[in-house]
Amino acid sequence: MDKNTEAIKSMQDNKLKEAAKLFEEVIQENPDDPVGYINFGNLLEHVHEYEKAERFYKKALELDPNAATAYYGLGGLYFDQSAYQKAQENFQQAIRLGLEEADVYYMLGMTFQKQSQFKLSLPYLQRAAELHENDEEILFQYGLSLAQMNQLHDAKAVFEKVLMQNNQHSDAHYNLGVIALYEDCATDALAHFNAALRAQPDHILAANGKKKVEMYLKENNG
């Protein structure tokens, strides 16, 4: 195992001091290789040392202006700081430079979500879902964007796919409950709100939905 791989493993094992020491050695031994700076930037970002992480990512880009993963790293740290426009620009650049991974499309989609630009988020979340079709969080956010664009039929299919991955996903049940109300299926809505509450008893929106549907059913069923 080379030193860089060893450092990444230490980071994954949450041995952060050990990882930092190894990354420092990697950079000292290969000062013109952007990879060491990018990986150290990832570590610094992980511990919320955002200013230092930014410097390491930018150093990597000085060495290689086409280092797509450095742009991805910058996008992530700007996203963590709610600088969504800057995050968006960096994720877009990472994609332009050929980074073809679910995570970068997902994060770009989420930057548009955070800016309430739901129509723009859709193609990126859809692409992320295509690349990582078993990731329940990616699927859920894609479904949410569809619902926010009032594409309820498609959203319903995606939320149902989320439940195939995890039938205890409370927010997927809640959103299916809301869609059922739009479809005038109050009993289906109630079933989903109840399922959401079984999975998450403090789900306030599901509790409110359940209360309203029960009142509606009581009034209309005598």
Image (cartoon, rainbow, N blue to C red):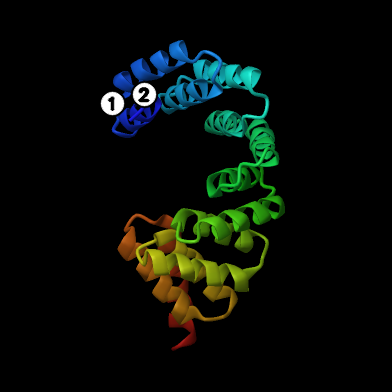
Residue occupied by mark 2: 3
Residue occupied by mark 1: 15
Foreground pick, 210 / 67: 67
Secondary structure under badge 1?
Answer: loop
Seen at 68% across and 39% down, the residue is 92
Secondary structure under badge 2?
Answer: helix
Kind of residue at disc 1:
Lys
Res 65 → quadrant: top right
Seen at 54% across and 72% down, the residue is 157
Query: Is residue 9 visible in this depiction of the protein?
Result: yes
Q: Is residue 202 left or right of residue 112?
A: left
Expressed as whole percent of the image width and height from the top left, the position of residue 58 reads 61, 19
Question: Quarter holding the N terminus?
Answer: top left
Kind of residue at disc 2:
Lys
Foreground pick, 43 / 21: 21
Residue placed farthest to the bottom in the image?
222
Q: Is residue 9 left or right of residue 131?
A: left
Seen at 31% across and 28% down, the residue is 10
Disc assigned to residue 107: none
Query: Is residue 208 visible in this depiction of the protein?
Result: no
Res 222 → quadrant: bottom left
Q: Neighbour class for label 1 at 10 Å: few (<14), some, many (≥20)?
A: few
Seen at 55% across and 56% down, the residue is 131
